[in-house]
Image: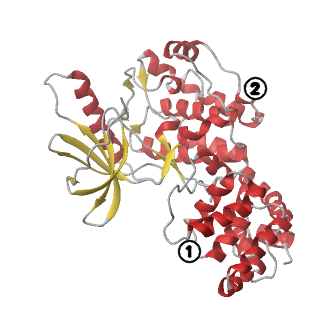
């Protein structure tokens, strides 16, 4: 029988419950509001009443408290923030950050990601892990379903239910708990563990992102045997993989069965990845993902009306973009509509997704018929304060010129800034702001101009 929809409680602790976010075997997650500061929150709950001596429930409650204690000591943009743990009647709850996103697991079934986006995701994960490990917390269950991806391409680590809090900085004996295909060998063997179990899991994730498949798969007993006794082919050699050889050695190092052979810590893993990608460590835009990858990894956004927008206008934009972009047009329109407050700005944002300059100009020109006031604004977007929109060839040239300084992320940045900019000069200034060296900035300006 399907689960019935539970009646919403009016409150949990001080929080006013406003909606239902999800329901699982062990509890319910609600949308709520903190009445003191009017902040929206997610409330994760667990029913704590039961028979005395119920070992399974006691273990679940301990993991629930552990999640609050582990995540509660961490303050990092890449980790879902925990605000409070409490008990209301026979319900234990955790008030946490409300994330506008979805688990990464939902979008990984369609194959490998572009290498630049793999770098972008892994930089974010390793930065979050470095923070957790520095505060004595080992997650122990890093996997796609415990990684939330927001609509602006940000990764957030969640679910610290089986995290280990290392008070003394010593290794501890492992318990056989976790998700088999992401568990390090020492977790299966019940031996001493430390932060390097998370580095193994990060290696498993990076392998899947590059190769489009997991390095270990099958029944739990089969996965255990593979992890303990078999070495997978490097991601570039996996069946059907188009992954570059460049990242093979680092991924396989992270998947070493000997913890001491893995990167020393998350920071070392991150620095090695930066070096391979040719990206300077300072000023890396860690959240940079291409719009195409974000759209692919997230479910179609905005099934209902968007506040402040006429549905007819949005559908018209989708229809005009459909011949050039295909089904992704609907997601891009609604994603951009959440971030824009007027139609000319929305037109300019969407035009950046059209590689063909003629198609881009036709799309922008069609907006001139919307009305006199809108036509004036759309014309300003079309011409820009410098008179020229950044054409597709110029955007590609920017990616090539930035490549030696920013690495594989450069083409993504050039396209993303073009999609956001209101004019060519605004676009150029956004790119120049990412370069510290004055001589390099001057050379880039010469290479992309004049407008």
Q: Does 114 sit left or right of 89 as displayed?
A: right
Mark 2 or 1: in front is 1
Instruction: Verify CB contact (< 8 Å) between mark 2 and mark 1.
Output: no
Q: Is residue 180 above or below residue 357?
A: above
Residue 56: image quadrant is top left
Residue 263 showing in the rendered view: no
x, y percentage for residue 417?
A: 69, 65
Ranked by sequence position, the earlier of labels 2 and 1 is 2
Q: In which quadrant of the rendered image does the C terminus lie?
A: bottom right
Which label was assigned to residue 237? 2
Pick the residue in front: 368 or 160: 368
Which secondary structure, mark 2?
A: helix
Q: In which quadrant of the rendered image does the N terminus lie?
A: top left
Q: Does 114 sit left or right of 73 as displayed?
A: right
Q: Is residue 89 above or below residue 176?
A: below
x, y percentage for residue 16?
A: 25, 58
Residue marked by disc 1: 341
Q: Residue at x 16, y 40 (%)?
A: 90
How many labels, in total?
2
Residue 415: image quadrant is bottom right
Q: Is residue 262 above or below residue 323?
A: above
Q: Is residue 397 above or below residue 99?
A: below
Q: Residue at x 86, y 63 (%)?
A: 393
């Amino acid at each position: 029988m399907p689960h019935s929809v539970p009646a919403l409680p009016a409150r949990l602790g001080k929080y006013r419950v406003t909606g239902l976010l999800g329901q699982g075997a062990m509890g319910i997650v609600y949308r709520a509001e903190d009445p003191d500061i009017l902040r929206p929150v997610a409330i994760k709950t667990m029913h704590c009443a039961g028979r005395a001596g119920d070992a399974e429930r006691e273990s679940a409650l301990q993991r629930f408290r552990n999640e609050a204690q582990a995540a509660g000591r961490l303050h990092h943009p890449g980790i879902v923030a925990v605000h409070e743990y409490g008990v209301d009647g026979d319900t234990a709850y955790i008030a946490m950050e409300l994330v506008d996103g979805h688990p990464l697991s939902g979008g990984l079934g369609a194959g490998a990601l572009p290498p630049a986006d793999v770098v972008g995701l892994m930089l974010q994960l390793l930065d979050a892990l470095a923070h957790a490990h520095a505060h004595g917390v080992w997650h122990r269950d890093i996997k796609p379903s415990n990684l939330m991806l927001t609509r602006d391409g940000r990764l957030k680590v969640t679910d610290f239910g089986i995290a280990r809090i290392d008070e003394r900085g010593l290794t501890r004996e492992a318990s056989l708990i976790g998700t088999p295909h992401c568990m390090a060998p020492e977790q299966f063997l019940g031996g001493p563990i430390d932060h390097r179990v998370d580095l193994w899991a990060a290696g498993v994730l990076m392998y899947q992102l590059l190769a489009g498949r997991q390095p270990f798969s099958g029944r739990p007993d089969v996965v255990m045997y593979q992890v303990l006794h078999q070495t997978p082919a490097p991601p570039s050699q996996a069946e059907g993989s188009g992954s570059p050889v460049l990242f093979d050695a680092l991924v396989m190092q992270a998947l070493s069965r000997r913890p001491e052979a893995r990167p020393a810590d998350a920071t070392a893993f991150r620095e090695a990845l930066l070096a391979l990608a040719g990206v300077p460590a300072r000023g890396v835009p860690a959240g940079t993902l291409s719009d195409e990858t974000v759209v692919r990894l997230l479910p179609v956004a905005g099934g209902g009306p968007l506040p402040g927008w006429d549905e007819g206008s949005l559908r018209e934009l989708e229809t005009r973009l459909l011949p050039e972009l295909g089904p992704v047009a609907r997601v891009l329109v609604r994603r951009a509509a959440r971030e824009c407050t007027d139609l000319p700005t929305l037109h300019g944002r969407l035009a950046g997704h059209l590689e063909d300059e003629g198609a881009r100009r036709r799309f922008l020109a069609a907006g001139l018929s919307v009305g006199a006031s809108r036509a004036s604004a759309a014309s300003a977007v079309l011409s820009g304060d410098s008179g020229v929109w950044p054409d597709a060839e110029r955007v590609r040239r920017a990616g090539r010129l930035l490549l030696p300084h920013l690495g594989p992320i450069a083409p993504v940045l050039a396209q993303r800034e073009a999609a956001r900019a209101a004019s060519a000069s605004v676009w150029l200034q956004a790119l120049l702001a990412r370069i510290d060296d004055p001589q390099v900035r001057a050379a880039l300006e010469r290479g992309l101009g004049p407008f």
